[in-house]
Image (spheres, rainbow, N blue to C red):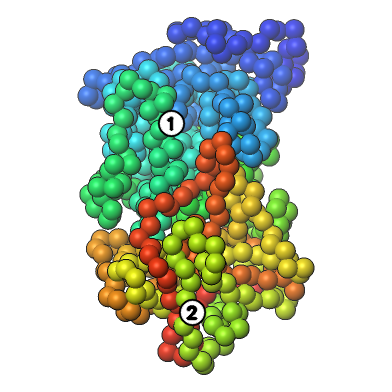
Amino acid sequence: MNKFLGNPKLEPTNPKDIQPGFNKIVVNTAHYGNQEMIMEKDVPIKMRDGVTIYVNVFRPDKPGKFPVVMSMDPYNKDGLPPYDIFRQVWPTVGTIVTSLFAPFESPDPGFWVPNDYILIKIATRGSSNSEGDLYPWTKTETQDYYEVIEWAGVQEWSDGNVGLNGVSYLAMTQWRVAALNPPHLKAIIPWEGTSDLYREWYFHGGIPETVFSADFEKLQHTRWPNNNIEAMVSAQKEHPLLDEHWEERQVILSDIQVPMFVCASWSTQGLHNRGTFEGFKQASSKDKWLLVHGRKEWETYYLRESLEQQKEFFDYFLKGIENDWMDTPRVRYEVREKFYKGHIRTANEWPIEGTRYSEYYLNGEEMSLQQVPVQNETKLTYNAEPGQTENNDLRFKFTADEDMELTGNMKLKLWVSTYDTDDMDLFVGIKKFDRHGNEVFLPDFNHLEDGQVASGWLRVSHRELDPVKSTPYQPVLKHKRLLKLNKGEIVPVEIEILPSSILLKSGESLVLVIKGSDIIIDDNPTGSRGYGHTDTVNKGTHSVYAGGKYDSFLLIPVIPKNY
């Protein structure tokens, strides 16, 4: 019988019937029918400090040594896929097809084991039945991962080659342990993962994120009510600047040397988008590839097309199979046109060589964006407090007179002031409109369907730039001290707008939105699917200055047609 056709006469095993220890199971896979394999549940591994971490091991039911694929997170190593639950609370996550043995965001043993890989699922200390306290993304957690990698590399069923794979938290842990370069770690697949907790998750431009962060912590307490779990939300309030609390969780991405297949998304801005691009850019790996899509996170990860690419990469670097993976373009990215419509282009690097960064100046008289500097000075004011319905934003538009591909980071330079308080929270959005004046909605954070092209944020007291990390097209903030405003003081600011890709056809428009609160509000009555910023400093009105000596402009990345 063809091993990839499975055996329909076998009775699939229900994960609820699995006992700790050695189990022979039948997995009803999504792609290969009913497949026999071995599952060792709750394998104990003692860490350097005596704490025991537990893992589940799935392996082929036959003699031999095989490469290992593993992932680590605190969500529940033994849980059935919670997609039925998420479809009730988050009804727009997309189509996700796995076996019943694939924990949330994790590689599916139903795909990897039939392809002669061993799959290991690690429960972080303080989660599932692993001992210890749950302190996410710390050096302690990272060292645990290192030790499990090295343990797996010398087991009797292992051929000594270990690869890492997984989405979100499972990618975030990969950045950290890969920077330690464990000897048995041979390749990684970080699929959409924040790499800078301060800038990309807990503070957007210095503005505290208050919705997703709280939901994440609540989830851990709900799942592990008897465990000691770090109070990250309290720490966020106690550490509003980038101090030792956040630095302890930072990763030196340039220390990563292992081959990597990185997947980023235009549509997880506010969480994974920026950090995944930074991971790819900054890693020292000579063998690294970037795939970028503009669709939904989990749906894309589990697509058969995605799985086959992951397998081809691991086949080359873990099994040594000559399969022409090295001919894969180093960068492949989707140029979005509209919701789930786009085309794939390739490049040799990121950012894309030859990108033409063009300044579009804010014209406050016509509320437009124009390529030549504006002569007349204007002062524009909007109501900045959340909940305002009248004059609550500023919008500037330009209409393309030829087809344009915009791919990369945008930047917004503004001159701003306020009379009502000593600080300002600025929310920036980039939107696309079709030739008929209708907004073109796109997938956005955590699977929203009414999303925009790109987002940016700034708390003006955090406006001090890091001159070492900043580039002309990507301002990076220090977040080390507060520069409060005097009443009516006009200051220049530079706002990082996160990486995106959009095709503007002739007659289509790009619109810049400046607001004092979140531009996209998630009104899902059953729970949040996105981020939020409910703790703003805004009071009264904000003023934006343009023209003359106030060179406010939007910098956009134009990809030449002959690229």
| Looking at the image, residue 115 lies above or below residue 396 | above
Which residue is painted at 44% across and 44% down in the image? 211
Q: Which quarter of the rendering shows the C terminus?
A: bottom right
Q: From the top left corner, tell me how far across and down residue 432 is, in percent.
A: 65, 65
As drawn, the residue found furthest toward the bottom would be: 375
Q: Which residue is mark 2?
A: 380
Q: From the top left corner, tell me how far across and down residue 82 is, in percent.
A: 56, 26
Q: Earlier in the sequence, mark 1 or mark 2?
A: 1
Element assignment for label 2: strand
* Residue type, mark 1 in image: Leu
Q: From the top left corner, tell me how far across and down residue 521 is, in percent.
A: 54, 52
**Toward the viewer: 280 or 295?**
295
Does residue 244 appear left or right of residue 287 in this picture?
A: left
**Toward the viewer: 526 or 477?**
526
* Residue type, mark 2 in image: Leu
For mark 1, does the 10 Å Cα neighbourhood hold few (<14), some (14 to 19), or many (20 or more) residues? few
